[in-house]
Image: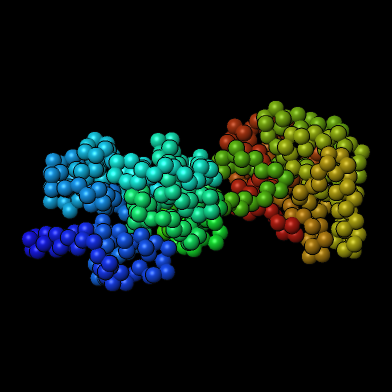
Amino acid sequence: MKRIISLLIFLAVLLGVTPTTFSVAEAAFSDVPTTAWYHDAVIQAADLGYFAGTGNGNFSPDICISRAMLVTVLAKASGDELSKYREQAFKDVTSDAWYFEGCNWASEKGLVTGVGDGYYAPNAKLNREQFCVVMSHFRDKFGDSAELQYDYTEFDDDGAISQWAYDYVHTLRQAGAILSRVDNYFVPKATVTRADFAVTLLSCMGMLDNLPEDPQRHIFSISVTPSLSSVEEQKNTYVDVKFMPEDAHDKGLALYSSDESIATVDAAGNVYAKKPGKVTVTAVATDGGLSASCEITVTKKPEPKPEPKPQPQPIGGIRTNLDPNKPMIALTFDDGPHPTYSNQILNILEQYASVATFFEQGMNVDRYPDVVRREAALGCELGSHSYNHPQLTKLSYSQIRNQMDMTNQAFYKACGRYPTVMRPPYGSRNASVDSAVGLPLIIWSVDTLDWKYRDANYVYNYVINHAYDGAIVLMHSIHGTTAQAMQRIVPKLISMGYQLVTVSELGYYRGSPLKAGQRYYSFQ
Ligand code: ZN
């Protein structure tokens, strides 16, 4: 098999170098139309044996040349005897490679230097500036020695040409062996096709009178802009790819993500963020292989905030430092405020950091607002006891409302707050009262009859003997004997393990948060 191939190559070379008016290539390549800008150069180079076809009757003018292809063609064009170049020049170009002698030859002639560490990277593609360096050297050694007479002007993208390539690029331009790629752009990083190569090669060898111009509108710049540089995981964003010139003949594009486990990108530029991290999204233009990249950061999805648990709305301020497992009792005082006795009751409550509930008459609130202010300040619960103590069951609905409104206003005026609970005078109520007061109705479960027995010992004993967890105790703040009894009631109840609480607290901690229009007797 090897022998047959060698024979065919020999024949091709023989035919190539044999002067003839008959073009083998013309008949051979179906993909090189006579109207193509590169037609003459390709046919001539093939007839000279510099190029072979790519099989199946094709020349493949648009295929990008590799570094192996470059030196193989140049070696043939040089006319040197290649069989002499059998000394391996590069680690990655071994004697069984079809480009072995070409690489060795190009290395010895100083046309190529490899990619470092003794490697040549034969399959890597060449870009235009690298190509110009090699071709400029080739022209000096094997090609046209005509003086440089062509274009001396700068390219619009001269600044993009690598420093080591700059002079070679411009020497070739002045030699008339290379043109701008589109408009006045050289596009140094674009790839080189077989058609480009044939044209420049023949020009360097002085075989073309005029360099044909590639009429295609090639891309000279590409950019990628992320719509969001930072995106949450499991969300989408996109990248916007722009070309110049806008009327490029080939807008073909490939998009890549540097890490598809972090984010993927589709052909339309849609980015799907998968997990936190950073990725580089790169767009590569089919035409010329120009590329551009952008970085996208995928951020962690914020932990969903737990829905705030609906807290029962405390009415009248519920303390949170109470122990629901210890007994509680609500002491309540009607008919005040009283300028002396109310304050005596408040003194002992304050001393023991305890609270009670005061059901005040609105008219007394108007008279002694300071007392109400102090009750509020000490955390006691403010209760309405009507404005002037009528039996509410004998009043019309609107009269009841009037009693409530006047009392509410008195409280608000005194301390900036409204009462949160209501006790009807005499405990007298019916369905109309219940609905008219607009507050929870607090009756009682322990009646001290302190208004009847004006005796501090009696009141003290009655409270202590009838106390139980959840009880609502009825007293009055307008009697000195009650205020006197309180001096002993408070420390005694506390020593018995009771927490002295407001009615609202008792309801809250015993599972029955108070509701307007509902009646409460105790929370057992
Ligand atoms: Zn009363």
Q: Name the quadrant containing residue 65.
A: bottom left
Residue 294 in picture, x, y percent from top left: 48, 47
- The front one of 121 and 215 is 215
Q: Residue furthest top?
A: 351
Residue 261, can we see it? no
Locate the N terminus and report the quarter of the image it occupies.
bottom left
Residue 363 in picture, x, y percent from top left: 91, 44
Residue drawn at 48 percent across, 61 percent down: 215
In the image: residue 453, left or right of residue 72: right
| Rendered image coloring scheme | rainbow
Residue 50 in picture, x, y percent from top left: 26, 56
Residue 358 in picture, x, y percent from top left: 78, 42
- The front one of 329 and 486 is 329
Residue 132, can we see it? yes
Q: Name the quadrant containing residue 2.
A: bottom left
Residue drawn at 79 percent across, 30 percent down: 344
- The front one of 128 and 338 is 128
